[in-house]
């Protein structure tokens, strides 16, 4: 795609762009900083507002010619709906663009509430072209840019001017009780895998894109200058391009030897690239997130995860041998989660020594079915699915055993209260185990109650202070404040 240059000239004639983020998993919004660099380089007057941290003033909305709303995940999209409605009620002449991973799959809903342009995939170049077009002529009646763009971009170093300080966001918590300021960036985008439950697949369809190494290097340097002591690489899978990944972190470590970082890597890749795990440790990696999802082989097969429970045990051992902490994530409740399998899930967490490693919310996450989910291709999924919920922005499903739906809802409430009260992870696990035993009763309760009590102190592994909600279906209680 060729970008039309923006018109230069006095500030009064420059296009006034307002970029908004509602939620980005507790990170300073990369999804604002990256396009801001492109737009400012072409002469646009850009204001970035993270409404999760600061108040968006009405006058800021009124001043905008174009409002771009970043939608990287489900929660951010739900929060964006009332925000977009507010923007258009205050400034009905503004051209509203929704961009990011969840924009294309929610295109119909977004256009119904007044969004004029929807951009997914590699959005920086198309967004720049959109602003250029709006500055040069009257807005087109219909969208001319592709909804999904997967072109190979020459990235720019993100421009974080005007965003809240890094200290306003999630931190890395250390086992001794200290914390580190976290900066967030990306070395690759998209993913070459086709996991059926993954929201990346409907947009990238098995493709991934590399951010040039010099851009990542300068971005990390800028984050360190802002106070970052730790970097989270938000790549869907850091080992989609292992050579690129190692080159990036080696250069990072050579320049900033005291800097630590964390990454996300598939179980499959942890095994295939086991020889690289010591390199991660030696360059400052202290934590690897991996989407285990389930210990149930049937669920793993439906999700097309391409690993087994035995593979996970091997990956856990390899990381332990390399001296890198593990942050496993799960989709604990699916239509195929039985009373027996959930009991075994909790017992496996204990047996594998994962109590300190698992964020409490993972015990209650319920499968999310956004528009476009590949799981809807399966008859085994469709038999449980009801109508699409336009408020929840997902396909609702019901468990064949109503008691499992009740258990999930109760455990989510229990975990929410425990996290708010900052209870130790061992205490939360024991509470989840006790509640599950009481709910299920019988022999399953006996097995759960036979487990010894968990430690009550601080986790023995580093962890990020922001819980992982990205694959969780919203409960009715979660929806109410957002409607």
Image: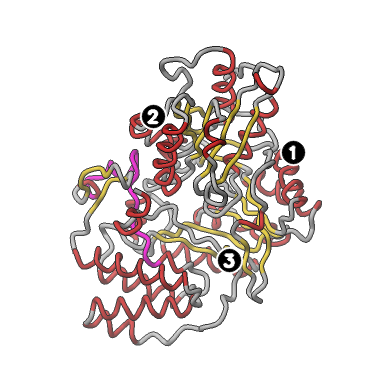
Residue 214, numbered circle = 1
Quadrant the N terminus occupies: top right
Rendered position, 224 above or below 135:
below
**Residues in magenta, as a range:** 363-380
Binning the other alpha carbons within 10 Å of mark 3 as few (below 14), some (14 to 19) or many (20 upward) gives many
Question: In the rendered image, which residue does mark 2 sit on?
Answer: 114
Question: Residue 88 falls in which quadrant of the image?
Answer: top left
Query: What is the distance, in whole Å, between disc 1 and disc 3 at their CAs?
Result: 28 Å
**Residue at image location 64% in from the left, 37% down from the top:** 211
**Residue 431: image location, x then y, percent:** 38, 79
Q: Is residue 379 in the magenta section? A: yes
Please indicate, yes or no, whether residue 26 appears anywhere in the rendered image: yes
Rendered position, 232 above or below 172:
above
Please indicate, yes or no, whether residue 318 appears anywhere in the rendered image: no
**Residue at image location 32% in from the left, 47% down from the top:** 392
Q: Which secondary structure lies at badge 1?
A: helix
Position of residue 377 in the picture relative to residue 69 (left or right): left
């Amino acid at each position: 795609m060729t970008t039309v240059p923006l018109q230069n000239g006095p500030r009064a004639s420059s296009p006034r762009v307002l970029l908004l983020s509602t939620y980005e998993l507790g990170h300073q919004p990369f999804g604002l900083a990256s396009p801001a660099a492109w737009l400012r380089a072409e002469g646009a007057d850009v204001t970035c507002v993270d409404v999760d941290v600061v108040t968006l003033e009405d006058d800021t909305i009124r001043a905008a010619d174009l409002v771009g709303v970043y939608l990287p995940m489900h929660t951010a999209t739900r929060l964006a709906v009332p925000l977009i409605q507010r923007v258009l009620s205050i400034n009905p002449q503004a051209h509203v663009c929704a961009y990011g991973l969840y924009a294309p799959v929610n295109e119909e809903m977004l256009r119904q509430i007044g969004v004029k342009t929807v951009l997914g995939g590699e959005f920086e170049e198309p967004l720049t072209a959109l602003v250029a077009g709006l500055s040069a002529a009257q807005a087109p009646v219909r969208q001319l840019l592709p909804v999904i763009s997967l072109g190979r971009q020459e990235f720019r170093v993100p421009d974080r001017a005007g965003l809240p300080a890094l200290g306003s966001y999630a931190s890395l918590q250390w086992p001794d009780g200290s914390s580190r300021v976290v900066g967030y960036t990306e070395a690759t985008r998209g993913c070459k895998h086709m996991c059926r439950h993954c929201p990346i697949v409907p947009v990238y369809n098995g493709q991934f894109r590399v951010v040039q190494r010099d851009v990542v290097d300068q971005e990390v340097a800028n984050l360190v200058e802002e106070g970052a002591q730790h970097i989270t690489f938000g790549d869907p899978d850091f080992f989609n391009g292992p050579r690129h990944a190692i080159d990036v972190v080696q250069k990072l470590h050579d320049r900033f030897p005291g800097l630590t970082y964390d990454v996300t890597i598939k179980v499959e890749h942890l095994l295939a690239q086991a020889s690289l795990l010591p390199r991660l440790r030696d360059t400052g990696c202290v934590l690897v997130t991996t989407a285990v999802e389930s210990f149930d082989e049937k669920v793993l097969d439906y999700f097309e995860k391409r690993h087994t429970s035995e593979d996970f045990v091997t990956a856990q051992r390899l990381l332990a041998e390399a001296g890198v902490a593990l942050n496993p994530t799960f989709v604990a409740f699916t239509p195929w989660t039985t009373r027996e399998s959930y009991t075994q899930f909790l017992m496996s967490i204990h047996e594998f020594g994962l109590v300190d490693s698992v964020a409490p919310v993972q015990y209650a996450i319920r499968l999310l079915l956004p528009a476009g989910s590949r799981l809807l291709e399966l008859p085994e999924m469709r038999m449980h699915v009801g109508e699409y919920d336009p408020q929840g922005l997902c396909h609702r499903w019901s468990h064949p055993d109503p008691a499992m739906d009740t258990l999930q809802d109760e455990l989510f409430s229990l975990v929410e209260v425990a996290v708010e009260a900052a209870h130790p992870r061992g205490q939360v696990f024991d509470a989840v185990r006790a509640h599950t035993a009481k709910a299920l009763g019988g022999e399953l309760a006996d097995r759960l109650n036979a487990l010894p009590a968990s430690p009550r102190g601080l986790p023995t592994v580093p962890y990020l202070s922001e819980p992982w909600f990205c694959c969780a279906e919203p409960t009715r209680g979660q929806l109410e404040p957002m409607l």
